[in-house]
Amino acid sequence: MSWPLTKTGQGLINWPGTFKYFPSTMQTSSIPLQDTEGVIEAYTWLNNNMTKTSSLLVHVTFEFWALLYLDQNYVAYLFDNNLDAAINSALTDGFQSIYFVWWNQDIDWYNLELSDNWISVHDSGRISVYKIS
C-alpha cells in the first residue's frame, strides 16, 4: 500500500522543509526532554515580569510552548531565521522591553547565536530568558 501524499513525490511529506518540524523520535519534542522544566519556569518568570510595554520574540522551536505557557495578554513575535526582523517589528510597534527565551549554552540543535546586546535576566537550567539592552 502506498500513501497518496508520497506516491508521486508530491505533497506535504516530501516537501524538503517539512522534516525540520518533526521530532527525531516520538520521545522528543522541539526541545530536549531535560530542558522541559526550564522552559516552563522561563515562561512562568515572563508571566510574572512582563508588562504592557513588553514583548517576547518566539523562535518557532518554542512556538507551542509559548502558546501553552505565556499569558495571552502579552504580544509575541514568531520568527524562524531572522531574529533582527523580529526585533525591528517589536521596536516599530513601540515595545520598550523585548525578551527572548533560548539556551544559555550551545546544544547543537539550532543555528542561532545571540549578540552581546542580549542580557540574561533569568536562568533555569540550560534555559535563559534574555532581554535586549
Image (cartoon, rainbow, N blue to C red):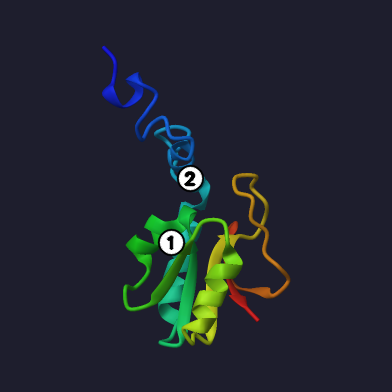
The residue lying furthest to the right in this view is 116
Residue identified by numbered label 2: 33
Amino acid on which disc 1 is placed: Ile
Total marks placed: 2
Q: Position of residue 104 (x, y in %)?
A: 64, 60
Residue 40's tag is: 1
Who's the residue at 60% across and 56% down the image?
126
Q: Nearer the viewer, residue 7 or 1?
A: 7
Residue closest to the eye, 77 or 74: 77
Q: Residue at x 32, y 73 (%)?
A: 72
Marks 1 and 2, how far apart at CA: 12 Å
Q: Is residue 110 left or right of residue 71?
A: right
Determine whether 60 is above or below 98 in the image: above
Question: Which amino acid is tagged 2?
Answer: Leu
Is residue 48 visible in this depiction of the protein?
yes
At horizontal 37% and vertical 69% (from top left) the residue drawn is 70
Instruction: Give the crowd class for mark 2: few <14, some 14-19, many >=20 residues within 10 Å.
Output: few
Q: Examine the rendering and report whether any part of residue 124 can be seen.
A: no
Bin the neighbour count of mark 1 within 10 Å (Cα to Cα): few under 14, some 14-19, many 20 and up.
Answer: some
Q: Secondary structure at mark 2?
A: helix
* Residue 127 coordinates in the image, percent (x, y): 57, 60
Note whether 44 is above or below 126 in the view shown: below
Name which of mark 1 and mark 2 comes first in the sequence.
2
SS state under label 1: helix
Image quadrant occupied by the N terminus: top left
| Rendered residue at 57%/56% (across/down) | 81
What numbered label is drawn on residue 107? none
Q: Position of residue 25 (x, y in %)?
A: 44, 32
Instruction: Check the picture and name the quadrant holding the C terminus.
Output: bottom right
Q: Is 38 positioned to the left or the right of 103 in the image?
A: left
